[in-house]
Image (cartoon, rainbow, N blue to C red):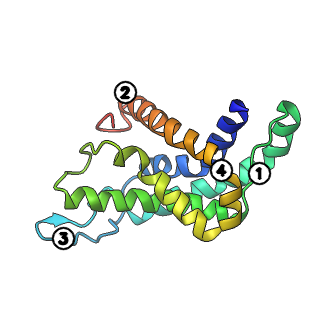
């Protein structure tokens, strides 16, 4: 059932979708790279901070806990069965999303792109790859049972659309300096 796949995919990814947005809202703080460079470029840049990473990860974990509370009532009301998150999966998804974004920032700096510069594909899926990789390590059985091939297809198709849409909204309301 397509609706079930979409619900499962989006629900399961919510703890990974939220951390980077929460990190932006937390804003500022000490850069993870401490200002260090590799060659003539920063390792990560000022946009990747310890505070943002911590707040983003905590926001994703808190969201997973909240989703666990409402999963049963939603299932009863809709007949759909959204997944619940064991603590290890919640941490894996949230921390992995942050880790994927940090890795993408490193790759962007190595490729000569400045902070905020577009890197199509990487910008939309970096956090997904990180979230799934960390989740596989932290909660392998849960990840395999939840992210079936059909769910993965929905995630890979829906995420770029959602990412671009939310970034455009953030840009229009002044929360981001660029619409990507």
Q: CA distance from mark 1 to mark 3?
A: 42 Å
Q: CA distance from mark 2 to mark 1?
A: 32 Å
Q: Mark 4 falls on what kind of element?
A: loop
Q: Mark 1 falls on what kind of element?
A: helix
Mark with earlier residue (2, 3): 3
Q: Residue at x 50, y 42 (%)?
A: 156
Q: Residues within 10 Å of mark 4 (few under 14, many from 20)?
A: few
* Place of residue 30 in the rendered image (x, y in percent of width and height, measured from the top left): 34, 66
* Place of residue 56 in the rendered image (x, y in percent of width and height, measured from the top left): 51, 56
Q: Residue at x 32, y 33 (%)?
A: 179
Mark with earlier residue (4, 3): 3
Nearest to viewer (mark 2 / mark 3) = 3
**Quadrant occupied by the N terminus:** top right
Q: Residues within 10 Å of mark 1 (few under 14, many from 20)?
A: some
Q: Residue at x 73, y 36 (%)?
A: 4
Mark with earlier residue (1, 4): 1
Query: Is residue 170 shown left or right of residue 67?
Result: left
Contact flag, marks 1 and 3 (Cβ < 8 Å) = no
Which dot marks residue 37?
Answer: 3
Residue bearing mark 4: 148
Q: Residues within 10 Å of mark 2 (few under 14, many from 20)?
A: few
Nearest to viewer (mark 2 / mark 4) = 4
Position above or below: 69 against 166: below
Mark with earlier residue (2, 1): 1
Mark with earlier residue (1, 3): 3
Residue bearing mark 1: 68
Contact flag, marks 2 and 3 (Cβ < 8 Å) = no
Contact flag, marks 1 and 4 (Cβ < 8 Å) = no
């Amino acid at each position: 059932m397509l609706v079930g796949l979409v619900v499962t995919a989006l629900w399961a990814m919510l703890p990974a979708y939220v951390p980077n947005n929460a990190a932006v809202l937390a804003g500022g703080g000490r850069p993870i790279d401490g200002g260090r460079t590799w060659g003539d470029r920063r390792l990560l840049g000022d946009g990747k901070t310890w505070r943002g990473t911590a707040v983003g990860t905590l926001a994703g974990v808190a969201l997973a806990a909240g989703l666990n509370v409402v999963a049963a009532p939603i299932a009863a009301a809709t007949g759909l069965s959204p997944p619940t998150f064991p603590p290890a999966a919640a941490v894996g998804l949230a921390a992995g999303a942050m880790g994927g974004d940090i890795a993408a920032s490193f790759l962007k700096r190595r490729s000569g792109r400045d902070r905020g510069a577009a890197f199509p594909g990487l910008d939309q899926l970096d956090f997904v790859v990180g979230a799934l990789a960390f989740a596989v390590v932290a909660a392998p059985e849960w990840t395999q049972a939840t992210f079936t091939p059909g769910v993965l297809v929905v995630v890979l198709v829906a995420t770029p659309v959602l990412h671009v849409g939310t970034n455009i909204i953030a840009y229009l309301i002044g929360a981001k300096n660029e619409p990507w």
